[in-house]
Image (spheres, rainbow, N blue to C red):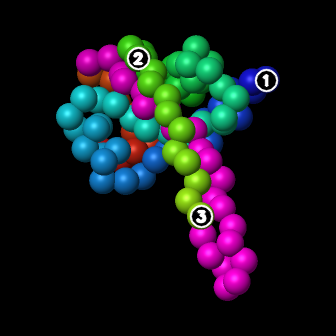
């Protein structure tokens, strides 16, 4: 990616992601589908000023939705789970 701001789209806000924060100091983000792990690591370290230990990625397949008689599909999204070093936190999550 050309700009680091284009890598991270939004944080994943769910009960499971908040459990990961308290259990293993791991934060979840929706990321651009074409980014790779080193780009995600660099973006998180530079944007939040933390030390990243590990980056895991996965795809969440879009669900089929019905709009009247038309059947559409939500877009598939890429999620990155970023594990931080001991003692580092990201204040944007508010945990």
Which label lies toward us, 2 or 3?
3
Q: Can you tell which quarter of the image residue 69 is in?
A: bottom right
Which residue is depicted at the point 66% across and 62% down? Answer: 73
Does residue 88 show up?
yes
The range drawn in magenta is 65-86
**Residue topped by disc 3:** 64
Q: Position of residue 77 (x, y in %)?
A: 59, 45
Name the image quarter holding the N terminus: top right
Q: Nearer the viewer, residue 71 or 85?
A: 71
| Of pointers 1 and 3, the one earlier in the residue sequence | 1
Determine which of the numbered discs, if any, sits on residue 54 in the image.
Answer: 2
**In the figure, is residue 1 to the left or right of 18?**
right
Mark 1 is surrounded, within 10 Å at the Cα level, by few (under 14), some (14 to 19) or many (20 or more) other residues, namely few
Rounded to the nearest angstrom, the CA distance separating label 1 from label 2 is 22 Å
Q: Position of residue 18 (x, y in %)?
A: 30, 46
Mark 2 is surrounded, within 10 Å at the Cα level, by few (under 14), some (14 to 19) or many (20 or more) other residues, namely some
Q: Nearer the viewer, residue 38 or 92?
A: 38
For label 1, the SS is loop
Dominant SS in magenta? strand
Q: Can you tell which quarter of the image residue 4 is in?
A: top right
Which residue is depicted at the point 62% across and 48% down? Answer: 76
Q: Which residue is situated farthest in the right direction here? A: 2
Determine which of the numbered discs, if any, sits on residue 2 in the image.
Answer: 1
Q: Nearer the viewer, residue 73 or 40?
A: 73
For label 3, the SS is strand
**In the figure, is residue 82 to the left or right of 76?**
left
Does residue 10 show up?
no
Q: Position of residue 74 (x, y in %)?
A: 63, 59
Is mark 2 in CB contact (under 8 Å) with mark 3? no
Q: Nearer the viewer, residue 53 or 62?
A: 62
Which residue is depicted at the point 41% across and 17% down? Answer: 54
């Amino acid at each position: 990616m050309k700009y680091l701001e284009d890598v991270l789209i939004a944080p994943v806000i769910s009960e499971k992601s908040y459990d990961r924060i308290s259990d293993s100091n791991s934060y979840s983000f929706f990321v651009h589908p074409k980014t790779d792990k080193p780009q995600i690591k660099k973006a998180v370290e530079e944007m939040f000023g933390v030390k990243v230990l590990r980056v895991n990625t996965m795809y969440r397949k879009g669900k089929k939705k019905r709009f009247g008689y038309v059947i559409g599909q939500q877009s598939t999204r890429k999620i990155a789970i970023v594990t931080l070093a001991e003692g580092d936190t990201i204040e944007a999550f508010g945990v």
